[in-house]
Image: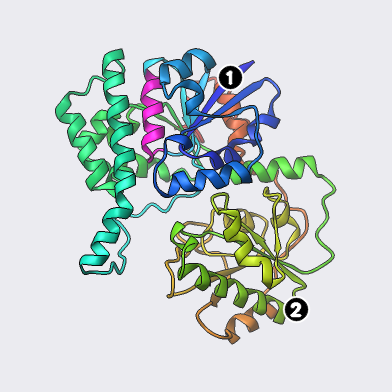
């Protein structure tokens, strides 16, 4: 029996790792989140999440352990720590404590991250009122980060967890508050020193990401091992297909929309603009001969927002989650969600939504970038080109061949047990080559 501690900053994070629970009966997974510590919008979202998601005995709030890492590790006694992000303060803090306790640490990204070199350029309103509104919007987050960083910095100093001096700590904190994008994605020297050698093993879906992490995270990943596998969505796909070997495509022509909203979409006027895009998408797929459109909400969507999107548009909501809806649908629609990676694997017909009325992240990763897809301009009253393309482009709805897919959950479990990934045999002749770097 191995006990795995998964640590994250929000309650819905458990949906990314829950497949581990059913994969191996010898694994005892405990998911701990810091939702009750949050302030501002994340704190309000937490109240919705508590209603939206079922109470599970292996999902716990950090408050259950008195917001104390020593108490957490003493009670759970984990054999390994798993995080699904390296760019959040909660995960980095847990990692350096695991290092202090000599608990092996693992990272599997919860999605395919948009690895920009610089912050996105936005049309930020100017003027005193706009600046004041932004200030009040940011203050709760500043308070949260300030409390979290210094609370655990001083606690860790007392316990001998961190050796960074006050100057390094101050520089790290200033970057966290004043230059958050770079603190997350391209940390400066002081931040790298503070979290140096924090992570033992990174399980990534693309081998080229090894160079990215070394270049941008520097000392944080010094000494880390990189394992090339699949995404967590791939793990869901392989598990679903193995559990449902006779799964048949739908007898109807189904279009399936994967929602990827910014949190700004949850407020007006963006909520109504997004709904207008969804309505135009529905009209488009019905005009192209599809029987219906199914809406797949993001795990972080409030229920009332999802209902607002679909209730009066006669759009079915996929409340099951998972990947069953993607497998049985003919057309997969979205912007750049990592679930579209699964649509590529399934060789589905794909439609990409675009708009200049709201912020949209268009495809930014391979193989989605080079995959043939219908381009839909949701700003038009009727996109005739997209309609024509939908009528002629074909996809497939049959059962895919998953024999060559790499499963990060199986690889993670094998690594925890000291075995090599399932898809890569051990090399008895020396250092392991191929998928482990």
User: In the rendered image, which residue does mark 1 sit on?
Assistant: 3
Describe residue 179's horizontal placement relative to residue 108 as left or right: left
Q: Position of residue 429 (x, y in %)?
A: 51, 20
Question: Quarter of the image holding residue 172?
Answer: top left
228 in relation to 277, above or below: above
Q: Nearer the viewer, residue 292 or 186?
A: 292
Observer-nearest of 332 and 437 = 332
Horizontally, residue 194 falls left or right of residue 241, namely: left
Chain-order first, disc 1 or disc 2: 1
Magenta-highlighted residues: 86-99
Residue found at x 53% / y 59%:
260
Rendered location of residue 310, percent (x, y): 65, 66
Crowding at mark 2 (Cα within 10 Å: few <14, some 14-19, many 20+)? few
Name which residue lies at 58% across and 37% down: 14
**Can residue 432 be seen in this snapshot?**
no
Q: Give the overall secondary structure of the magenta segment.
A: helix
Q: Circle 1 — which element?
A: strand
Q: CA distance from mark 1 to mark 2?
A: 50 Å
- Quadrant position of the C terminus in the picture: top left
Residue 18 x %, y %: 63, 36
Residue at left offset 61%, top offset 60%: 306
Q: Quick one: label 1, few (<14), some, or many (20+) residues within 10 Å?
A: some
Callout 2 secondary element: loop
The picture quadrant where one finds residue 160 is: top left
Q: Which mark is residue 49?
A: none
In magenta segment, residue 90: yes
Residue at point 47% right, 74% down? Answer: 355
| Residue to which mark 2 is pinned | 289
Residue 435 visible? The answer is yes
């Amino acid at each position: 029996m191995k006990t795995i501690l998964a640590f994250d900053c929000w309650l819905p994070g458990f949906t990314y790792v829950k497949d581990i629970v059913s994969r191996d009966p010898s694994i005892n997974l405990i998911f701990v989140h810091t939702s009750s510590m949050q302030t501002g919008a994340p704190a309000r979202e937490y109240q919705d999440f508590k209603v939206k998601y079922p109470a599970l005995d292996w999902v716990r709030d950090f408050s259950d352990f008195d917001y104390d890492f020593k108490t957490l590790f003493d009670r759970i006694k984990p054999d390994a720590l798993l995080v699904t992000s390296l760019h959040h303060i909660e995960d980095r803090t847990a990692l350096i404590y695991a290092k202090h306790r000599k608990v092996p640490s693992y990272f599997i990204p919860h999605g395919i991250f948009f690895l920009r070199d610089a912050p996105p350029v936005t049309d930020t309103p100017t003027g005193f009122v706009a600046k004041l509104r932004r200030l009040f919007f940011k203050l709760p987050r500043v308070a949260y980060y300030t409390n979290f960083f210094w609370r655990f910095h001083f606690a860790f100093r007392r316990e001998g967890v961190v050796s960074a001096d006050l100057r390094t700590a101050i520089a790290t904190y200033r970057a966290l508050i004043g230059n958050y994008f770079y603190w997350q994605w391209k940390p400066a020297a002081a931040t790298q020193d503070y979290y140096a050698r924090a992570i033992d093993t990174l399980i990534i879906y693309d081998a080229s990401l090894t160079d990215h992490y070394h270049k941008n995270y520097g000392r944080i990943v010094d000494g880390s091992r990189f394992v090339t596998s699949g995404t967590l969505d791939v793990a869901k796909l392989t598990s679903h297909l193995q559990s449902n070997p006779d799964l048949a495509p739908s007898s109807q022509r189904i279009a399936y929309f994967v929602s990827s909203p910014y949190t700004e979409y949850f407020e007006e006027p963006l909520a109504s603009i997004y709904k207008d895009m969804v309505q135009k998408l529905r009209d488009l797929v019905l005009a192209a001969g599809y029987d219906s459109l199914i809406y797949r909400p993001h795990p972080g969507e409030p229920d009332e927002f999802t209902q607002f999107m679909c209730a009066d548009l006669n759009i079915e909501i996929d409340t099951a989650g998972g990947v069953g809806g993607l497998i049985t649908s003919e057309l997969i629609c979205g912007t750049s969600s990592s679930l579209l990676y699964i649509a590529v694997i399934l060789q589905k017909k794909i439609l990409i939504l675009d708009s200049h009325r709201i912020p949209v992240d268009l495809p930014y990763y391979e193989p989605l970038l080079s995959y043939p897809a219908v381009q839909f301009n949701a700003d038009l009253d009727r996109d005739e080109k997209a309609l024509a393309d939908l009528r002629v482009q074909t996809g497939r709805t049959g059962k895919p061949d998953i024999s060559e897919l790499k499963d990060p959950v199986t690889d993670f479990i094998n690594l925890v047990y000291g075995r090599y990934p399932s898809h890569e045999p051990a090399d008895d002749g020396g250092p392991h080559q191929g998928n482990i770097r």
